[in-house]
Image (cartoon, grey):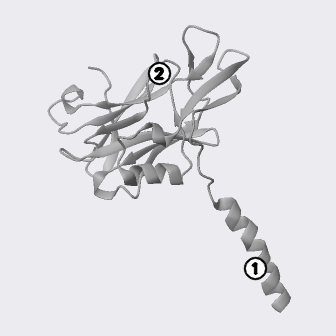
Amino acid sequence: MILRLILATCCLVPVTAALQVSPPPQTEQTETGPAHLPGRLYVAYRIRLLPVSSYPQLPAPVSQQLVQKGCMIPQTYEAREPENVIHGSFEKKGSDDWAALCSVNRVTTLYVFFQSDLDHPIPLRHQPDTEWLGVEWSLDYGSAWGIATRPARLLQPKDSADHDGIEDAFVEHSSTIHYFQNGRWTALDSTQ
């Protein structure tokens, strides 16, 4: 009986240690590798990842959550300045909310932080970093996942939207507007 207890205790320590997330790097990183694109063979890709510290405007609780999760912020292939961290009234009119893309172990999650509970971000959706790739002027493929704040005045139908939505875009292909209403997320028409 004592031997079983000792074995159980010793075996739990490595599992617990494996669950801990190491802190993300504090400098820009580049994720590289091969990726399979529909209708093509494998292509090489490069995704720029910025540390959370690149976004000094973030409230401390949001920053802390992203760092604790080990997040690096992926940049689209067309980025010229830090992107994919947004601010708006996503929960309700007048709220002070945030959303960010968070890449950990080659998977990106879209997290939403409501002002009413900044310590508990909502993982809206996730996908592999290579799911949406695009290319601009060179032969390098990069991330084509971008998010933006969509103001209420640009949402459809205009008569029922009184706060901002989150535009979730596959750059130069398609986009979805996530809108929080009546305690749940819905998809709205992304046309202007």
Front residue of 153 and 15: 15
Residue 159 or 52: which is nearer the viewer? 52
Q: Is residue 135 above or below residue 55?
A: above
**Residue under the image location 60 percent in, 27 percent down:** 47
The answer to whether residue 1 shows anywhere in this view is: no
> Residue 110: x percent and y percent?
46, 41
Above or below, comparing residue 135 to residue 2 in the picture: above
What's under tag 2, amino acid-wise?
Ala
The quadrant holding residue 15 is bottom right
Q: Mark 2 and mark 1: span between their CA atoms?
A: 49 Å
Instruction: Tell me where residue 138 appears, x and y as whole percent.
Output: 61, 9
Disc 1 is placed on an element classified as: helix
Q: Residue furthest bottom?
A: 1
Tell whether 3 sits left or right of 64. Answer: right
The residue under label 1 is 9
Q: Amino acid at mark 1?
A: Thr
Q: Which residue in the structure is indicated by mark 2?
A: 79
Image coords of residue 74 (percent x, y): 53, 32
Depth check, mark 2 against mark 1: the one in front is 2
